[in-house]
Image: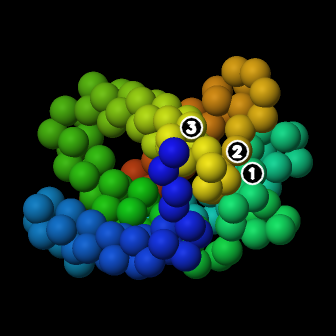
Amino acid sequence: MLVLTSSQATLIAFIVAPGLFLLSAWLTHATRRHLLGALVGACLYAGLNFLWDHFAAAFGWWNYPGWSASGQLPWMIYLLAGLVGGGAGGLVGWRIIRRWRWKGLAGFLLFWVFYALVHDVGGSHLFASSNLMQFGAGSVPILMDILWYVTGNALPQTAIWLIGERPG
């Protein structure tokens, strides 16, 4: 069984998150306005992630016992996740949606459905001994996790569009 401590996961996030944001900014040729939209989107993503996690804990859908005694993540993890999901992922999504419009949006959000299954559900099983994330019983926690990823990755697109695409 693979073991990953919360300290190791935090260190990895501190390295990966800024790198992915910078790489996506460069690859997408984002303007300053798009970068600002992506950073606002990253903050929105982090805040929505925090809210979803607290609702999930209250309803017994999922928690993070390997991170803290309360089963909640530290704020820094939400900010780093926002930089990756809302920032880097937001910029990639912006380019996909800009190119393929509604089909791009549908494909982008469908990607996050599969990502939720691989990252959260698969990761929680693969690193089960680490207790980094635990799901409640049944299919409802998994469906809610998928819904979190879809809403969490749609929200930054709104910020990028409002700040980066609208004239003015």
Furthest residue to the top?
139
Q: Residue at x 15, y 39 (%)?
A: 99
Q: Quadrant of the C terminus?
A: bottom left
Q: Is residue 136 above or below residue 127?
A: above
Q: Secondary structure at mark 1?
A: strand
Q: What x and y, as percent, mark residue 144?
A: 67, 33
Q: Are marks 1 and 2 in contact (CB under 8 Å)?
A: yes
Q: Residue placed at 28% from the left, 58% from the top?
A: 91
- Structural distance between the alpha carbons of marks 3 and 1: 14 Å
Task: Choose mark 3 or mark 1, whichever is in front.
Answer: 3
Mark 3 residue type: His
Q: Amino acid at mark 1?
A: Asn
Q: Is residue 63 left or right of residue 14?
A: right
Q: Position of residue 94 (x, y in %)?
A: 27, 51
* Horizontal and vertical percent position of residue 143: 64, 27
- 4 up-or-down from 31: above or below: above
**Residue labelled with disc 3:** 125
Count of numbered tags:
3
- The Cα–Cα distance between marks 1 and 2, rounded to whole angstroms, is 6 Å
Kindly tell me whether residue 47 is visible in this rendering: yes
Q: Is residue 85 above or below residue 134?
A: below
Q: Which residue is the site of mark 2?
A: 134
* Residue at the spot of label 1: 63
Disc nearer the start of the sequence (3/1): 1
Q: Earlier in the sequence, mark 2 or mark 3?
A: 3
